[in-house]
Amino acid sequence: MSAVNLSHSGADAHAHDEHDHHDLPWIRKYVFSEDHKYIAKQYLVSGIIWAIIGGLLSVLFRIQLGFPDADLSWLKPLLGEWIQNGKLDPEFYLALVTMHGTIMVFFVLTAGLSGTFSNFLIPLQIGARDMASGFLNMISYWLFFLSSVIMMFSLFIKTGPASGGWVVYPPLSALPQAVNGSGFGMSLWLGAMVLFIASTLLGGLNYVTTIINLRTKGMTFTRLPLTIWAFFITAILGILSFPVLVSAVLLLIFDRAFDTSFFLSEIYIGGEALHHEGGSPVLFQHLFWFLGHPEVYIVILPALGITSEIVSTNSRKPIFGYKAMIFSLIAIAFLSFLVWAHHMFVSGMNPFLGSIFMFLTLIIAIPSSVKAFNYIATLWRGNIIFTPAMLFSIGLVSFFLSGGLTGIILGNSASDIQLHDTYFVVAHFHIVMGSASFFGMLAGVYHWFPKMFGRMMDERLGYIHFWLTFIGVYLIFFPMHYIGIAGFPRRYYSWTGFDAFSTFTDLNQFISIAAIITFVAQFIFIFNFFYSMYKGRVATANPWRSNALEWTTPINPGHGNWPGAIPTVYRWPYDYSKPGSKEDFIPQNVPFSETPESNFPNEVDEI
Amino acid sequence: MTSVIIIVAIALILSILYLIFRIGVLTNVMNGRYQKIVGIGNTINSFLFIVVFVVGVLAFYLSFMSASKYFLPEAASAHGVRTDLLFWVIMSVLTLAFLLTHAVLYFFPFMYRFKEDNKAYFYPENHNLERIWTIIPAIIMAGFVVYGYKEWTAITAPAPQDSEIIEVMGKQFAWQVRYPGADGKLGKHHYRKIDAVNEFGIDFNDSASYDDFVPMELHMPKGKNVSLQIRARDVIHSVFLPHFRVKMDAVPGMPTTFWFTPTITTAEMREKTGNPEFNYELACTEVCGRGHYAMRFLVVVDEPADYEKWKKSQKTWASLNAEYVANKVNAPKVLVDKYLKEFLPTTAQSVTDSTSIMTPSMDSTTVSMNVVKGM
C-alpha cells in the first residue's frame, strides 16, 4: 500500500493549516486515514482483490460445468477436501456460486464501485476539501474491511461458506440440516452483511450530506457532473433500501438462533418435524428483493454516471440531454422501488400482483432506453478519442442495451414462467448488471487513475485489455441465452441427469474456455494498474482536457485538494467544442466574462 | 519436477512479455507519441468496432442457427404454445432493436473518430428527438404489457372445475406425487404426521385419504386440464416441467398451484422427435441443497382412456401400507375396518390393540430410528 505515497508526494505547500495532516502518525495517514482520496484508494484496492477472488470462484465452477468429466485432482492443493475422488463436491459447487454472487454484487460492485468513486470524486468534482465527515468515512471503510475479513474467513471453515444462493432464501439458509453451508458459514454471511450494510449506510449518508452541503460557490445542482448526480441518487437508494435487508437479515438470524418462525412453517427435515408454524418464506423474498432490486441500480447507476462523464469528455461534445439524463436517473431510481416482485412471478404470490409488477417493470424500460439513446446521440458528430476509458464506456452502453433488452422478456410474467431461474436470467443480469457495471468501474479507473496516482496507465495495454474483455464477455454470455432458452436451470452442478438438459455440452465447454481466457485477461489490467502506479508516465494536470473541477487540483492533490481557495464554478461541466471557442473545452471554473467569443445570448447575462 | 519447469516457463514468458512492453513504451516516447492528442491506436480502435460488429452479427446469425434446434423444445401444453409465441414476438422486436442500436453504436465511433481539423458538433439537446425516443419505447412496452397481461391472467385464472387434481410434493432431493383416487379428493395431510413411511404426512382420520395412491411416475391425460397442487416439506423447491412451460415454487407451509392442459402424449412426442427414448421430465429450479440438480421425476402423458386404465391399476397407498396405517397412526378403527380389512393379516387386529397404547415418545424414537436406517 506504500504505493499510495505517490499521491502525497506533491502535497500542497502548507497552504491549509487545518488540512495539513503531515504531522499525523503513520497509522492515521496510511491505515486509518480520513482523507477521502486515500479511503477511495483503499476501497479500490479491496475491490480489486475481491474481484480476483470472485472471478476465481467463477472459473472453478465454470470448469465443473464445461468439463464435468474432468479429473480435478490437480485442484486438491487449493480446495482440499472439497475435491473428492477427483470431483468437485456438489455442495461446494453451490457454495462457489453463492459466494461468487455475494462477492461480486456487494463487495466488488457496491463497495468497490460506489466506495471508490463516490469517495474519490464527490469532493473533487463539487469542490469540497473533503467529505462532510471524514471520521464516519473512515469508519465506513473499516466496517467494510471487517465485513470482508468475516466473509473471507467463511471461505475457509470446514462446513463451508453459505451455499443457498446469494439470495439466501430460507428455509434453506435457515436450517443447517438442509445444507452444510447453512451452519456456521451462514452465520458468518449474515454477520458480514450486517457490518457491510452499516458501512454502506455511513458511506451513503456522507455522500448525500456532502453533495447537499459542501458544493463550492456557483456549483448549483444543474451544474453538477452526471457522475455526482448518479452517486447522489445511488446513495439515496442505498439509504432507503439497505435497512430493509437488515430487517430481513435480523429476522433470519432470529429464526436461526432464537427459534422464532418469521420465515419458517410446517417443516419436516432430517427425520423430525420442526415446531415452526405460521411463518412465510415468501415474506423473506419480498424483504430481500425490496433491497435486491434497488441494489441492481445501486450497482449500475454509478457506472452510468461515470461513463456519461467519460463519453462526453472523449466525444468532445456535451452529453446529449443533460436534464433528460438526470430525470431518467431519478425515474429509474424511483421505479426501482416498485418492481421488486418481478423476481417472484412464480414464487406462489398472488398472480394479480404479478400483473401489477409486470406493468411497473416494463415502465422502467422507458427511462433506460432514453439513457441509451442519449449516449448514442452524444457520440453522433463527435470528435471521438479512444482512450481505454472511452472504449470501456462504449462497451458499457453496448451491454446496457443488449442486457436491458432481454430484461423486457423476463419482466413479462407470462414469458418469465419458462425462463425464470434458467440460464437466460443468468445471461441477462451478468450482461446488464455485472459486465456493464464492471465496465463502468474499469472505465472510471482508467479515466481517473492520473488523478489518483499522478501517473498515466499504459493505453496500449488498456486497448488489449478492453478488446479481450469486451469480446470475451459476449462470448461467455451470448451463448448463455441459448442455453437458457433451451430451459437449462441455474445452480445445477451437472445437467446430465436429465434428457431435456443433456444437449449443449459443447457450448458449455466453449463458455468455460471463454470465461477462463477473459479472467486471465484481467491480469493485464492488474499489471497495468500496479505497474503504472510506480512507473507509469507522469500525468499532466488535465490529461483528458476535461471540464470537470477535479482537474483544476494539483497533479497530486494533498489534503484539502486545492492548495489555495477552492475554485468558483461558473458553468455546467459539458462545454465541449462550444461554437466560437478556440479550445474544444471550457472548464467549469472559467467565467463567462473570459469567453465572450463563445457565449450564447442567454449566457451573456451571467457575466 | 514438472511443476517447477512449468513455473519457470511461465516466469520466462512473463518476463519476455514485460520486456516487449517496456521496449514498446520507450519507442512510443522516442516517437513523440505522447506529444499528440491521439496516436495510430485511435484509428485502429475505431476500425475494430466495425470489424467486431460485422463478425459479431455473423457469429450471432450462425450460432443462433446452429443452436436454435434446442430452443424451447416443442410445447406440449395449450398455454405453452401461446407463451412461446409471446416469447418469439417480443424476441423479434428486441432483436431488431438490438441490431439497430448496435449498428449505430458501433458505426458512430468509426465514423466520428478524432480528426485533427475536426470540431465536434455542439448539440446539447433536442426535445423533439427525446420525446420521440421516449414515446416509441413507451408504445412498444404498452403493447407488450397488454399482450403479456392477457396471457398471464388466462394462465393464472382459477383451475376449471373438471381438472384432474394431482399433488406434487418436493423434498430433499426427490419429487413425490399423490393422486386423489376414486373419490377425486386428496386426503388431508399435516406435516407432523410425516415419518419415514408416510412421506406425505397423510392424515388417516380423513376418509378421503384411503383411496389416494402414490405412483412412481407423474401421469397426465392428454387434452384434459391438470391442476397441480404443489407443496414442499423441507425447503423451497420449484416444479419445472420444461415441455409444458410450467414453473411454480413449492413452498413449505404455503401450498401453491398451477393448472394447464397437456396436448401431446409421450408416444406422440416420441414420434415427433424421432426419439424412441423420449420422456417428459420434472425438474427442480429453486436451489434446495446438495441434490438440487438430481431431482428428476418421470412424467408420462397418456391418451385419456389409457390414463383411466392406469389409474384403475394403481393400488392405494393405504392398502400397500395397511399395517402401518392400522398400527402406527391411530387411524380410526371404523375407517381401517372399512377400507383396509382385506389387506391386513387376520392377526393384525390384536397388534392394533397392543400398539395403540404405545406412548408418543416411543413412537417418535421408532420413527427416527427408521429415518437413520433410511439415510
Image (tube, helix red, strand yellow):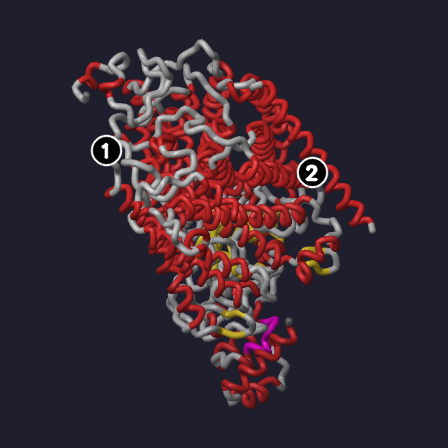
In the image, what residue occupies the spot 31% across and 11% down?
A580
Q: Is residue A302 placed above or below B198 in the rendered structure? A: above
Task: Determine the chain carrying the residue at label 1.
Answer: A
Magenta residues span: B319-325
Q: Amino acid at mark 2?
A: Asp
- Which element carries disc 1, helix, strand or loop? loop
Q: Is residue A52 placed above or below A224 in the rendered structure? A: below
Is A191 one of the magenta-colored residues? Answer: no
| Label 2 crowd (10 A; few <14 / some 14-19 / many >=20) | few
**In the image shown, does A340 or A189 lie closer to the viewer?**
A189
Q: Indicate the position of residue B231 as horizontal and vertical percent values.
A: 48, 60
Q: Indicate the position of residue B228 as horizontal and vertical percent values.
A: 48, 54
Q: Indicate the position of residue B49 as horizontal and vertical percent values.
A: 55, 21
Q: Amino acid at mark 1?
A: Thr
Q: Indicate the position of residue A599 as horizontal and vertical percent values.
A: 25, 15
In the image, what residue occupies the spot 53% across and 54% down?
A98
Question: Of label 1 and label 2, which has the lower sequence position?
Answer: 1
Give the alpha-carbon distance from disc 1 to disc 2, as whole Å: 56 Å
Q: Is residue B121 left or right of residue B18?
A: left
Q: Is residue A307 placed above or below A252 in the rendered structure? A: above
